[in-house]
Image (spheres, rainbow, N blue to C red):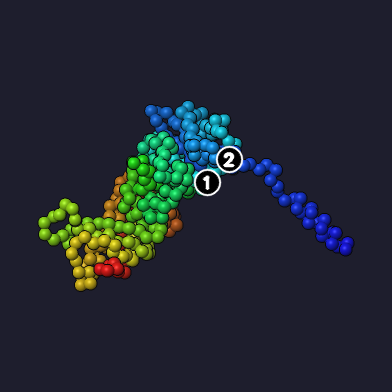
Amino acid sequence: MKHCWLKLCIIVILLGLLPGCYDKMYLEDATLVLVLGFDMEEDRFIVYSSSPVFNKDAKKKTEEFYDDKPVSVRHSNNNFDTMSSGIPSAGKIQTILIGKKLLEHANWFSMLDTLFRNAESTVNANVVVVNGPVSEVVYYHADDKPPLTMLLPKLISSSSKKNATLDTTLQEFHRQMYDQAMTPALPLLRKDTHLVAEGAALLNEQGKYVTSLDLQETTLLRVLQRNLTGIGSYTTSVPEFQSGQPNPIVQSKVSVDIAKLSVRIRTSYEHGRFIFDLRYKMKTRITERTFPFNTNMRKTQLQKQLDSLIQRDLMALIHKIQKNRIDPIGLGIIAQAYQYHAWKKVKDHWGDALSEADIRLSVKTEMLDSGVLQ
């Protein structure tokens, strides 16, 4: 009996040490900043925020604020807290919107300092470049869509899984900015009739905007990055199989899904230049063919043509990257690992070194099938 009382006392003491809920807060009384935006409009730095409203009596389900005279981002957040209808709760940001105009200014990255320094902030938020005014996205509302705070994470995630854009978290962006062996690449968002997440924005070593990639270039970038998720779609014209008079409606196009990708990269350093040998092997499936062709009889011919076309477009993207003296592919990481002594000499201006590098690329496809009925 004595031992039972002793065990009971120990259990009561341990339960007393468990954290309680004395500081509980009801969700309808909270303000969670889920979207944070930064932009330059008329030469003014502007900070935006968007939060969901959980109060059942509220007709509008989001709450937006902006500060067009911010002392700092931290100061703006404090101002937003005083204007919000609920008790602010930090560390819940899911999406960070950055206007393309802001990226054209030097030293803009320092404005994000509070997000990395504050222990309450999350580093898993998506960083997205807006091709246009950030205000158009922050104040976007559609009756047939969920609230913006819910829409943006789903939109970026689904587009990234289809390789239509990138998925760059705040932590990954921080690493890209400070890694001398590569340059940042961010997902691109624009507002047409609806919000569209496709393409990528490429930045230089200082974080300034350099150029953009369209949907197919982004898919090819993910191929070069060895970061293809799921199935990658590729569409191209095949002029070799054009028959008869050109048709403005139905052109000779072929689309394939890249089902599996394997990559072999070798690097060397000769005569003051880096040499990269990239070899890509892909397993593909034909998903569209708009020209008459006997796939069973001439499969090898089509496969060789496809190898040549994919290789051409990949090299065009590489030349675009070299021309802009950036490295979103991460070839600098390969050079750092296997040619460290040579890379160390050029690490402070790796973009210039890559622009002069000799990059050789080959593509070999294996056609798994040409469709269900065809």
- Residue 210 location, x and y as percent? 35, 42
Q: Which mark is residue 45?
A: none
Q: Element at badge 1?
A: loop
- Report which quarter residue 255 is drawn in: bottom left
Disc 1 versus disc 2: nearer the observer: 2
**Mark 1 vs mark 2, CA separation in Å:** 25 Å
Left or right of residue 307, residue 180 in this image: right
Locate the N terminus by quadrant: bottom right
Tag 2 residue: 28
Tag 1 residue: 123
- Report which quarter residue 161 is drawn in: bottom left
- Residue 165 location, x and y as percent? 38, 50
Q: At 36% from the left edge and 64% from the top edge, which residue is drawn?
A: 259
- Spot the residue most to the right: 2
Counting other residues with Cα less than 10 Å from the Cα at mark 2, is it few (<14), some (14-19), or many (20 or more)?
some
**Closest to the observer, 176 or 255:** 255
Q: At 39% from the left edge and 36% from the top edge, which residue is drawn?
A: 136
Locate the C terminus by quadrant: bottom left
Answer above or below: position of 66 versus 278.
above
- Residue 18 location, x and y as percent? 72, 51
Answer above or below: position of 221 versus 118.
below
- Residue 155 location, x and y as percent? 42, 48
Q: At 47% from the left edge and 31% from the top edge, which residue is drawn?
A: 66
Q: Amino acid at mark 2?
A: Glu
